[in-house]
Image (cartoon, grey):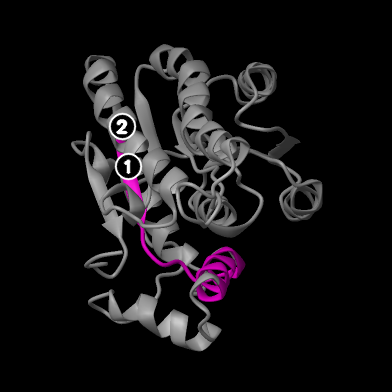
Amino acid sequence: MATPTGRKIIDGIKPGLRVFISAGASGIGRAIADMLILHGAKVFICDVAQGPLNDFQKEYPGHSAVLADVSSEGDMARVFADAKAVLGGLDGLINNAGVAGPTGAVEEIAIADWRRCIDVCLTGQFLCAHFAAPMLKEAGGGAIVNMSSVAGRHGYAFRTPYAAAKFGVIGLTQSLAKELGPHNIRVNAILPGIVEGPRMEAVIRARAEQLGLPYDEMAERYLEKVSLRRMVTPHDVAAMVTFLLSPMGDNLSGQSLGVDGNVETL
């Protein structure tokens, strides 16, 4: 089912809420899509991976899934035009797409890798907001949720491009909250912590290899920095998104909300 419990966690979401989710075919994005659909939303997702898109479409034939790169202006212009045609408008934007970026000392990081990380993690969010804002205004308001990271709160040695992009997401969020608030559009950022899954495993493995440590020891070091001493799940992040899109989040805007078990430092 869509959630581990297979039941709704929040009541009161508007039936047929129209939501666009970037990178919605796997990981956190898929968990968000699953939960919002369970709560009655009409979802339109994009992703760069055709296989997961096919899986999503097979499970949810009544919802839309398209191949697109959020860092491409042309792709986003096309996708949001499609979303408007299919959904008839938009009530919510979930800016979820991101990449881990390179791990390495600043002098070792390739400029192309820096640019790719910024393009996807920050410019991609700007492009989605650029095309979504007119639709949200036409709807009389709505909500944008931008995916930042605990790396957007703490400096992150050897992950400079990622941290820089995620700090940028906080600035984007606070600026859009001020700009769009008079149009009844709420804008918030979610800062996930160490989220269990293949992507986090790859990050831990890369750092372990850099330091010459076993994977298990490196994973333990990561968790020692979390007050609750555990990873969070994609479901935890999806629950916060669902809350923000529900009436219970009506007066939350411009906020940076950690879903991280309290990561004390990085």
Secondary structure beneath dot 2 equals: helix
Q: Amino acid at mark 2?
A: Thr
Secondary structure beneath dot 1 equals: strand
Alpha-carbon neighbours of circle 1 within 10 Å: few (<14), some, or many (≥20)? Answer: many
Q: What residue does disc 1 label?
A: 189
- Magenta span has 192? yes
- The residue nearer to you, when weighing 45 against 11, is 45
First reached walking from the N terminus: tag 1 or tag 2: 2
Q: Residue 14 appears at what percent x and percent y?
A: 41, 38
Quadrant location, the N terminus: bottom right
Q: Is residue 180 above or below residue 5?
A: above
Report the residue that reaches farthest toward the front. Answer: 107
Q: Residue 108 appears at what percent x and percent y?
A: 54, 50
- The residue nearer to you, when weighing 241 against 219, is 219
- The residue nearer to you, when weighing 240 against 5, is 240
Q: Residue 157 appears at what percent x and percent y?
A: 37, 57
Report the residue that reaches farthest toward the left. Answer: 251
Residue at 26% in and 23% down: 175
Q: What residue does disc 2 label?
A: 173
Start and end of the magenta stretch?
A: 188-209
